[in-house]
Image (spheres, grey):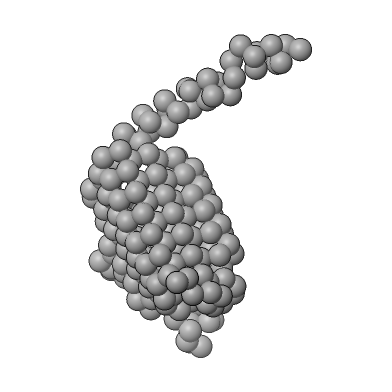
Amino acid sequence: MIFKLLHTICPPRIAALPCRIIRRVYSEWIKYEFRSCGKGCYFGKFIILNGGKHVEIGDHVTMGRGLVFEVYDQYQDQHFTPSVKIGNYVNIGDYSHLTCINGITIKDNVRMGRKVFITDNAHGASERSLLDMRPNTRPLASKGPVVIEENVWIGEMVCIMPGVTIGRGAIIGANAVVTHDVPPYTLVAGNPARVIKEIS
């Protein structure tokens, strides 16, 4: 009865107000970690934010909670020149993971579900000589940058792998593993992702 009374007096919308205020303060504070950050951005809490100085963010970008951004200009004795560019009105869902040593570009109006993984690199190339090394000690290797064009919709738990370009207006179904370029205005799904439908 006590909680029912409290709910009547203070509905969830009002009870969540302190959390929204804290998140707004955090958003204003964390934006100085990035190379640049536009206006009206709203961030959840990062679990890991490494290499923010290589990240450029546009206007009105929203990022969820529990994010991991790993942008490396140095790993062991390797040196890189990474670049992450996020356009305007991009939405990145909770618990997503981005890792970059080369280049990741996310253009305007991209929407992502939760737990999306985007990478332009891996621990070691597919070489037999590297497989006797512990994975964490293998050199990082990139097969090319990742580019996500405008107005792309990415479902939950999607993995976007190195060297991939996703065309404008594409839809990536939940749990898809994107290993090759995605044509514009298509629906792709599966592991590996394949074109299910062309959207005319």
Q: Nearer the viewer, residue 69 or 189?
A: 189
Residue farthest toward the front in the current orientation of the protein: 200
Residue farthest toward the right in the current orientation of the protein: 1
Q: Nearer the viewer, residue 10 or 73?
A: 10
Which quarter of the figure is the N terminus placed in? top right
Task: Give me the residue at 44% from left, 51% from top.
Answer: 92
Determine which quarter of the picture holds residue 99.
Answer: bottom left
Q: Nearer the viewer, residue 102 or 93?
A: 93
Task: Give me the residue at 35% from left, 36% from top.
Answer: 27
Residue farthest toward the bottom in the current orientation of the protein: 128
State the image coordinates of residue 190 (x, y, percent, origin top left).
59, 73
Residue farthest toward the left in the current orientation of the protein: 36
Which quarter of the figure is the C terminus placed in? bottom left
Visible residue check, residue 157: yes
State the image coordinates of residue 88 (x, y, percent, origin top left).
30, 51
Visible residue check, residue 135: no
Question: Quick check: 124 above or below 17?
Answer: below
Q: Is residue 56 left or right of residue 165?
A: left
Task: Give me the residue at 57% from left, 71% from top.
Answer: 189
Question: Quick check: 19 above or below 173?
Answer: above
Q: How many marks?
A: 0
State the image coordinates of residue 169 (x, y, percent, origin top left).
40, 65
Task: Give me the residue at 47% from left, 70% from top.
Answer: 199
State the image coordinates of residue 93 (x, y, percent, origin top left).
48, 49
Q: Nearer the viewer, residue 45 or 93?
A: 93
